[in-house]
Image (tube, grey):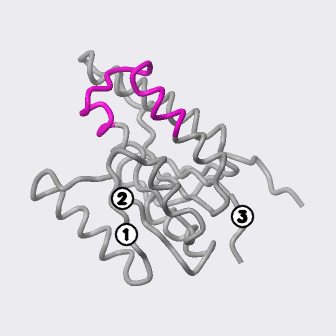
Amino acid sequence: MAQTGRIIMVTGGARSGKSALAESIASRLGAARIYIATAEPGDGEMAERIALHRDRRGAGWQTVEEPLDLAGALARTEGQGVRLVDCLTLWLANQMAQGADSQTDTGPAIKALCAALAATRSPVVLVTNELGLGIVPENALARRFRDAHGWMNQAVAAVADEVWMAVSGLPLRLKPERETP
């Protein structure tokens, strides 16, 4: 039986295995599974990536496409099963593409997301990238995105019950540091 209101964040680099790890966690949390997709197929290559994710998940997942109103999508799917959000990085990029340009501009959306997570009664698994391990980007927009993304990850990790990091296909538990009885 699924734990009520459990929030699990899964982070990692590109092709680290974070989505597969998140799908595995969500599958263990409940039979009714909802995949909240934030990606938009802006070109053929992205459409292929989306199709590969959908094929890997297989049957048993209801898909909700929501590139912007993530807090609303969580509210609309409350009580319907385990929700897997993939991914927060694309959601933040979508926010910035709509005109949000910094932590100040993205702050209200991130606060709404964290409030929705704190109020949830059904489990939520969130996928996000870990962008802060690389070099400092050479342009201002990329630096603003990287910074806003780091602040978003910190805010979501603070409300999460568990945080995992995928590295080379291997899961590392970050929060809580050890099992509680």
Amino acid type of the residue that numbered disc 1 sits on in the rendered structure:
Thr
In the rendered image of this protein, does residue 148 appear above or below residue 175?
A: above
SS assignment at label 3:
loop
Marks 3 & 1, CB-CB < 8 Å contact: no
Q: Residue 132, percent across and down? A: 44, 30
Q: Secondary structure at mark 2?
A: strand
Alpha carbons under labels 3 and 2: distance apart: 22 Å
Comes first in the chain, label 2 or label 1: 2
Considering the whole magenta stretch, tell me its main secondary structure. helix
Residue 64 is situated, as x and y percent measured from the top left of the image, at 37, 64
Other residues around mark 3 within 10 Å, as few (<14) / some (14–19) / many (≥20):
some
As drawn, the label of residue 37 is: 2
Q: Does the CB distance between marks 2 and 1 fall below 8 Å?
A: yes
Circle number at residue 4? 3
Q: Is residue 46 left or right of residue 116?
A: left
| Mark nearer the N terminus (3 vs 2) | 3
Provide the residue span drawn in magenta: 93-112
